[in-house]
Amino acid sequence: GQQVMQIPQYQHVQEGEDFTTYCNSSTTLSNIQWYKQRPGGHPVFLIQLVKSGEVKKQKRLTFQFGEAKKNSSLHITATQTTDVGTYFCAGPGSARQLTFGSGTQLTVLP
Amino acid sequence: DAGVIQSPRHEVTEMGQEVTLRCKPISGHNSLFWYRQTMMRGLELLIYFNNNVPIDDSGMPEDRFSAKMPNASFSTLKIQPSEPRDSAVYFCASIPGQSNTEAFFGQGTRLTVV
């Protein structure tokens, strides 16, 4: 079945440094979504990418969807302590179920 | 709308007891997902309903787990008998239509089996 892998699993950065997490799917995706989960919280939707090569920005966050629609990345510029949390990518499976990647846990040191 | 509502928020039970987790999806959403989250295994999809019908239950760990969706506004996930390794946070999420739209998660139920 479909597998969605994310790297790195953990990332510690100093406040102000950049951060990137990468997502790779074993199959071509019709779309990919990104979620953020704060410590002790629940996943919250950030964005969805649909088109091959698509790039979207939300303030300091930049999301990319690969040309082959099998990989994606999330880049945060100049991290802040409010960026702390786990970032997940998610893609639709063959039965339209939503399969989540393993997540990248971001720690921002003040 | 109050969002996806899960109950209870926390559950502590003894090994061997039956546990029932409840979820009320957002009104009008016709897809519902149950996920289990642990440090070791991350966010695992247990079962997926569409229009109250189970579509994919391949993630249900074993026969001790069962899920129902008797109507569009209510779903349950039952574990009988519970075991310590079932300790996790269980999330319910709903989607308006298909999986290419935003999923709305409940606050989760933190289950501890002792």
Image (cartoon, helix red, strand yellow):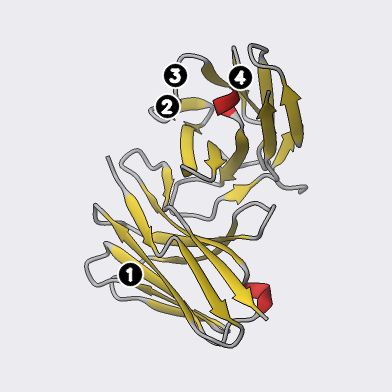
Q: Are marks 2 and 3 on the same chain?
A: yes
Q: Are marks 1 and 3 on the same chain?
A: no
Residue tagged 4:
B78
Instruction: Kindly identify the amino acid type of the residue bearing the numbered disc 3.
Output: Glu
Q: Are marks 1 and 4 in contact (CB under 8 Å)?
A: no
Spot occupied by residue B71 in the image (x, y as percentages of width and height): 63, 24
Instruction: Kindly identify the amino acid type of the residue bearing the numbered disc 2.
Output: Asp
| Mark 2 burial class by Cα count in 10 Å: few <14, some 14-19, many 20+ | some
Looking at the image, residue B25 lies above or below residue A78: above
| Mark 1 burial class by Cα count in 10 Å: few <14, some 14-19, many 20+ | some
Q: Residue at x 35, y 76 (%)?
A: A54
Spot occupied by residue A61 in the image (x, y as percentages of width and height): 52, 79
Spot occupied by residue B32 in the image (x, y as percentages of width and height): 55, 37
> Which of the two labelled residues, at mark 3 and mark 4, occupies the earlier sequence position?
3
Residue tagged 1:
A51
Residue tagged 2:
B57
Q: In the figure, is residue B46 to the left or right of A82?
A: left
> Which of the two labelled residues, at mark 4 and mark 2, occupies the earlier sequence position?
2
Instruction: Kindly identify the amino acid type of the residue bearing the numbered disc 1.
Output: Lys
Q: In the figure, is residue B8 to the left or right of B113?
A: right
Task: Please name which of the two marks, 4 or 2, marks the residue nearer to the observer.
Answer: 4
Q: Is residue A7 visible?
A: yes
Instruction: Kindly identify the amino acid type of the residue bearing the numbered disc 4.
Output: Lys
Q: In the figure, is residue A96 to the left or right of B8?
A: left
Please tell me whether mark 1 sits on a helix, a strand or a loop. loop
Residue tagged 3:
B62
